[in-house]
């Protein structure tokens, strides 16, 4: 054992209170009290874990965690939801998507609201499930609404390859896959953003590995640690970042070695490059158009590409003026600083996607911090 760094194999070992205390102690020891630290957790899964496990409560007040843009549902512009639903309005089309897409608002309502009005909308757990729907409904066309970073793109690619191999023609993918590196670049280019370091995304890195982050360390001189999703993963990553900052270093480190290979998953990357190519640009909610930041289906697989098979309206929608999703996505505002937070916009009545997805920072803040504070206020009033 060195400090709190021990070998762990089971999930409850990553949640041991005494190890968490030791990690928190080490963070307090390393953090210079005369300095304010701003670290961005890129991934929405980390944001969720930070609120779920109350990690902010064990960090020193001069260490601020900034929530990044790594929630794929949250960064999807409303127009893309409208586009997918517009195609699915056609007769004999089944709209299939992951569960976290179902309550995301489009201008004419969410997929679930469209289902209530009669659209054939199905929740699937994987693109392979959507392909199965196509096999069992040969008289219908199944549109799979694909979202996600490089984490989910390989399974979409493999499903398209399977559809081609089996000659299934009543299946297409409305591709909204995005890539993480250009989003980090856009954040770093943002003039109103000052960051000291990055907690690197864990899930995406299982596919792309750690090498694509090297420019952040080398060119931008920002340390980055690829991190797991348990409380000790996050605290250990913060320790690793503070050690780098204290030593004046900037390098890529991999805290999540038990899952993330440094070189990534070559088979997954091969499948992606077989089926997808980069779009010249793509609109991100809150970040605007970012060049080469999303994937499209190659012409060789046009038969399985919704955008090449159907006429897609290409809707562009501006978010409601008072909604500050963009600022929250860029980490400029905290969720509760949005004017609509907790009043007009709640998980029951979401206005932005950040309040819908479990990885959305507004939903995470509402479900853990906001409810905790509301309960504390009730207890004070009734005491
Ligand atoms: S509270 Fe609602 S409107 Fe405001 S940033 Fe969050 S999701 Fe967007």
Image (cartoon, rainbow, N blue to C red):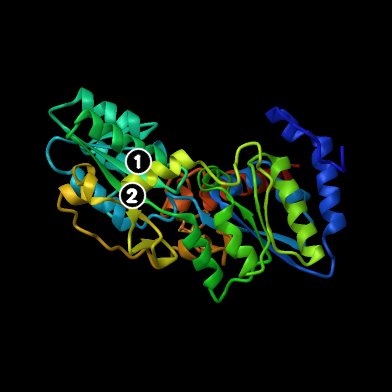
Disc 2 residue lies near ligand 1 with CB under 8 A: no
* Mark 1, secondary structure of its residue: helix
Query: In which quarter of the view is residue 118 placed?
Result: top left
Q: Return the residue at label 1.
A: 157
How many marks can you see?
Answer: 2
**Residue 37, image x, y percentages:** 73, 65
Q: Check disc 2 and report the residue beneath it.
A: 276
- Asked where in the image residue 371 lies, by quadrant, the reply is top right
User: Percent position (x, y) of residue 381?
Assistant: 70, 46
Quick one: SS at disc 2? strand
Query: Which residue sits furthest top?
Result: 136
Q: Quadrant of residue 372?
A: top right
Disc on the earlier residue, 2 or 1: 1
Left or right, 21 with respect to 309, comes to: right
Q: Is residue 89 visible?
A: yes
Crowd around label 2: few <14 · some 14–19 · many ≥20 (10 Å): many
Q: Are marks 2 and 1 in contact (CB under 8 Å)?
A: yes
Q: Is residue 127 above or below residue 45?
A: above
As drawn, is 240 to the left or to the right of 358?
Answer: right
State the residue in front, 154 or 189: 154
Q: Quadrant of the N terminus?
A: top right
Residue 358 sits above or below residue 60 on the image: above
Q: Residue at x 31, y 43 (%)?
A: 145
What label sits on residue 242 in the rendered view?
Answer: none
Observer-nearest of 357 and 227:
227
Report x, y in % for residue 97: 33, 38
**Who's the residue at 22% across and 39% down the image?**
117
Q: Position of residue 288 (x, y in %)?
A: 40, 67
Residue plotted at (70% across, 43% down): 233
Residue 103 shows in the view: no
Which quadrant, please, contains the C terminus?
top right
Distance (Cα) linking label 2 and label 1: 7 Å
């Amino acid at each position: 054992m060195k400090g709190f760094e021990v070998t762990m194999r089971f999930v409850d070992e990553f949640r041991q209170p005494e190890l968490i205390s030791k990690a928190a102690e080490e963070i307090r020891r390393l953090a210079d009290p005369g300095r304010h630290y701003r670290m961005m957790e890129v991934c929405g899964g980390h944001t969720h874990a930070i609120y779920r496990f109350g990690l902010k409560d064990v960090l020193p007040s001069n260490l601020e965690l900034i929530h990044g843009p790594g929630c794929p549902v949250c960064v999807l512009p409303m127009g893309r939801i409208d586009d997918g639903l517009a195609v699915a309005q056609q007769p004999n089309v089944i709209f299939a998507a992951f569960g976290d897409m179902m309550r995301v608002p489009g201008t004419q309502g969410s997929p679930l609201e469209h289902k209530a009005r009669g659209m054939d909308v199905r929740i699937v757990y994987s693109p392979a499930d959507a392909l199965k729907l196509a096999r069992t409904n040969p008289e219908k066309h199944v549109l799979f609404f694909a979202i996600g970073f490089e984490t989910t793109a390989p399974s979409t690619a493999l499903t398209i390859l399977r559809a081609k191999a089996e000659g299934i023609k009543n299946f297409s993918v409305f591709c909204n896959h995005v890539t993480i590196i250009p989003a980090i670049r856009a954040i770093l280019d943002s003039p109103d953003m000052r960051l000291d370091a990055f907690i690197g995304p864990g899930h995406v890195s299982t596919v792309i590995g750690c090498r694509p982050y090297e420019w952040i360390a080398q060119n931008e001189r920002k340390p980055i640690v690829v991190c797991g999703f348990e409380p000790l993963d996050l605290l250990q990553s913060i320790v690793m970042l503070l050690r780098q900052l204290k030593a004046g270093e900037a390098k890529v480190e991999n805290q999540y070695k038990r899952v993330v290979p440094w070189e990534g998953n070559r088979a997954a990357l091969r499948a992606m490059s077989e089926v997808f190519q980069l779009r010249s640009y793509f609109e991100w909610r809150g970040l605007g158009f970012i060049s080469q930041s999303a994937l499209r289906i190659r012409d060789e697989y046009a038969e399985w590409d919704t955008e090449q098979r159907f006429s897609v309206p290409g809707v562009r929608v501006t978010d409601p003026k008072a909604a500050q999703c963009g600022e929250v996505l860029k980490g400029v505002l905290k969720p509760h600083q949005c004017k609509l937070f907790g009043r007009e916009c709640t998980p029951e009545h979401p206005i932005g996607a950040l309040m819908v997805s479990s990885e959305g920072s507004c939903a995470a803040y509402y479900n853990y911090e906001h409810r905790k504070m509301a309960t504390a206020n009730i207890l004070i009033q009734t005491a």
